[in-house]
Amino acid sequence: MTDLTRYRGDTYADEITITGSDGLPLDITGYVFVMTVDPSKSPTDETNNIMQINGVILDAANGLVEFAPTATDVDQTPRNYYYDIQMTDTSGRKRTIDSGKYTIVQDITKA
């Protein structure tokens, strides 16, 4: 579990490296990734999701993927939310690869 923190309105990408059971980067060619953020740690459905970000593979051979929220995605009330990241491999098998707190904190600069 990895906790993430960002200032309200910041749109930089979160980058993660996907590794196999041996700890080495996994070749993620053809894989699909999605990060979902919700106010509840255990939502029963997607009704209250505040954002869902499709991952963009930056370096498939080295397992590098990024999740870049839009300004609308992160224009949220500062508080603790929760996220998970789901990976779908080329055979259609899904696996939740990370989850944790997703904290949005109040920014000072509004431009």
Image: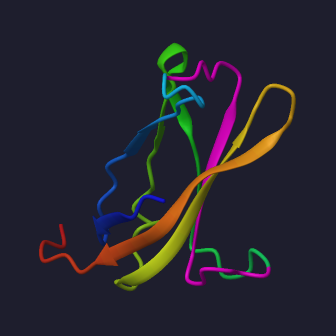
Q: Is residue 6 left or right of residue 77?
A: left
Identify the residue at horizontal 48%, vertical 78% (top origin): 81
Choose between 104 and 82: the one closer to the eye: 82
What is the quadrant of residue 22 in the picture? top right
Instruction: Farthest residue to the top: give it.
Output: 61
What is the quadrant of residue 35 in the picture? bottom right
Which segment is the magenta one? 25-44
Q: Position of residue 6 (x, y in %)?
A: 30, 65
What is the quadrant of residue 29 in the picture? top right
Image quarter (top left, top right, bottom left or bottom right) of the C terminus: bottom left
Instruction: Farthest residue to the left: give it.
Output: 108
Q: Position of residue 19 (x, y in %)?
A: 53, 30
60 over 95 or under it: above or below:
above
Identify the residue at horizontal 76%, vertical 31% (top origin): 89
Q: Position of residue 28 (x, y in %)?
A: 62, 23
Residue 40 in magenta stretch:
yes
Choose between 41 and 21: the one closer to the eye: 21
Q: Is residue 7 left or right of residue 37?
A: left
Identify the residue at horizontal 42%, vertical 79% (top origin): 76
Q: Position of residue 41 (x, y in %)?
A: 60, 80
Choose between 23 and 105: the one closer to the eye: 23
Q: Main secondary structure of the magenta part?
A: loop
Residue 35 in magenta stretch:
yes
